[in-house]
């Protein structure tokens, strides 16, 4: 646990000053580790790459559920980004101005980080011929949008967020050809695709933006639940109500098969049918994708708050306290591990080196988690000690 994280009572309330709620950092830390599973998979199990949504008839259950678990990462992280922005602003007399300024600067920083440091970690190519605009880019642009939305009344932010999350699937059939004037804008907002910048550089919008703006806005709107002096029991009731409501809504809407994602059909076995029912679309995140993942996220947040004495929450809080540091660190460690394995054993899966079984992905994830923990803990402690270094807040 970082040194600035106090021991919380059984039913904690929002903490004063710059302190964090342990439950928020713990949930962020948990989804970061789920992300690690997925990135190990994308590094060492790429010869069994899965589409979006997955082909359940051709995907082994252990691979399907490993990927499904990682679906929690982006929605929960974006929601907590909005919540954290509110809590950041609440420390200042002019909270909206403080939150807006921080969101704008950090959003620009994340966009720059994605196209430079992060993209290089994936490709090791300079100058790049392809730049993949992924989750850090989407979070950065969402923060830029939220920097403007915070000036709206909360009673407008909530319906706007719900409209973007629930209504964007109405636009699924809208597409623009690469030579159309709206192609670039629509590829950024909703229709995942390629943008040709020049004859030697292409951009891939892996995370279309529109629904993520809705998620970060709803996270910001949750802020008063966690504000200083807020009633903890009422907050937990709200988390329970919304969490269960989203999961029930997911089941009912998925069973109806009328809206919110690609239709599903029963399979040849109970397992295939279950996989089909849970086979949701991430790019862009469908209504059902967000209902399932955010529902689970809210219930986990409530559980972590109600049980702060659980010993295994402490290391999760460490990972969640410095998420960007861990994100960049793990990408480069993964890349060097892959290059080392390739140098020692060569390409054993066609043109790539890869593991022979999914359990090896999980073992590698556990090993990396333990190996990187000391560095993450040391940086979290350094960040807590050196509050005078302003740029550290961006990590």
Image (cartoon, rainbow, N blue to C red):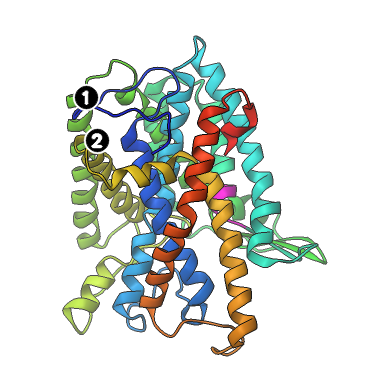
Q: Position of residue 14 (x, y in %)?
A: 32, 23
Asked if residue 164 is positioned above or below residue 392 in the image, the reply reads below
Report the predominant secondary structure element of the magenta stretch: helix
Kindly identify the residue that appears in the image at 33 percent across and 42 percent down. Answer: 314
Residue 134 located within the stretch drawn in magenta:
yes
- Quadrant of the rendering where the N terminus is positioned: top left
The answer to the question of whether label 1 and label 2 lie on touching residues, with beta carbons closer than 8 A, is yes
Q: Is residue 205 left or right of residue 50?
A: right
Q: Residue at x 39, y 73 (%)?
A: 54
The stretch in magenta equals 133-138
| Residue 361 vertical position relative to residue 245 in the rendered view, above or below | below
Image quarter of the C terminus: top right
Q: Residue at x 53, y 53 (%)?
A: 190
Instruction: Assign a secondary structure to mark 2.
Output: helix
**Can residue 110 be seen?**
yes
- Categorize mark 2 by other alpha carbons within 10 Å: few (<14), some (14-19), many (20+): many
Task: Identify the element where label 1 is drawn.
Answer: helix
Residue under label 2 = 305
Up the image or down, 355 lies above or below 190; here it is below
Nearer the observer: mark 1 or 2; the answer is 2
Q: CA distance from mark 1 to mark 2?
A: 9 Å
The image quarter containing residue 22 is top left
Image spot of residue 141 (x, y percent): 59, 41
Asked whether the viewer can see residue 164, the reply is no
Q: Which residue is mark 1?
A: 232
Task: State the image coordinates of residue 254 (x, y, percent, origin top left).
Answer: 24, 60
Could you tell me which residue is drawn at 19 percent across and 55 percent down?
A: 252
Nearer-N-terminus badge (1/2) = 1
Q: Tag 1: Cα neighbours inside 10 Å, few (<14), some, or many (≥20)?
A: some
């Amino acid at each position: 646990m970082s040194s600035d994280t106090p021991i919380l009572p059984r039913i904690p309330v929002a903490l004063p000053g710059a302190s964090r709620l342990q439950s928020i950092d713990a949930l962020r830390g948990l989804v970061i580790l789920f992300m690690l599973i997925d990135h190990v998979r994308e590094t060492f199990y790429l010869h069994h790459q899965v589409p979006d949504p997955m082909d359940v008839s051709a995907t082994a259950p252990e691979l399907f559920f490993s990927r499904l678990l990682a679906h929690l990462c982006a929605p929960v992280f974006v929601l907590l980004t909005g919540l954290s922005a509110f809590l950041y602003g609440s420390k200042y007399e002019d909270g909206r101005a403080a939150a807006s300024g921080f969101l704008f600067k950090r959003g620009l920083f994340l966009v720059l980080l994605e196209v430079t440091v992060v993209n290089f970690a994936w490709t090791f190519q300079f100058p790049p011929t392809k730049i993949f605009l992924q989750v850090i880019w989407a979070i950065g642009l969402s923060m830029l949008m939220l920097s403007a939305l915070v000036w709206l009344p909360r009673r407008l932010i909530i319906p706007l967020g719900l409209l973007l999350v629930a209504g964007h699937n109405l636009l699924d059939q809208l597409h623009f050809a690469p030579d159309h004037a709206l192609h670039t804008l629509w590829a950024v907002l909703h229709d995942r695709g390629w943008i040709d910048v020049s004859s030697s550089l292409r951009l891939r919008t892996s995370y279309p933006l529109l629904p993520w703006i809705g998620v970060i806005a709803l996270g910001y709107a949750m802020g008063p639940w966690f504000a200083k002096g807020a009633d903890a029991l009422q907050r937990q009731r709200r988390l329970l109500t919304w969490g269960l409501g989203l999961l029930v809504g997911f089941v009912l809407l998925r069973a109806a098969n009328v809206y919110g994602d690609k239709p599903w059909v029963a399979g040849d076995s109970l397992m295939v049918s279950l996989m089909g029912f849970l086979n949701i679309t991430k790019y862009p995140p469908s209504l059902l994708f967000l209902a399932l993942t955010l529902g689970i996220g809210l219930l986990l947040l409530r559980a972590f708050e109600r049980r702060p004495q659980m010993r295994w929450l402490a290391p999760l809080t460490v990972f969640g306290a410095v998420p960007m540091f861990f994100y960049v660190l793990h990408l480069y460690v993964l890349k060097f591990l892959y290059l080392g394995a390739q140098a020692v054993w060569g390409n054993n899966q066609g043109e790539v080196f890869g593991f022979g079984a999914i359990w090896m992905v999980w073992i590698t994830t556990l090993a990396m988690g333990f190996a990187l923990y000391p560095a993450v803990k040391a940086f979290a402690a350094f960040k807590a000690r050196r509050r005078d270094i302003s740029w550290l807040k961006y990590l």
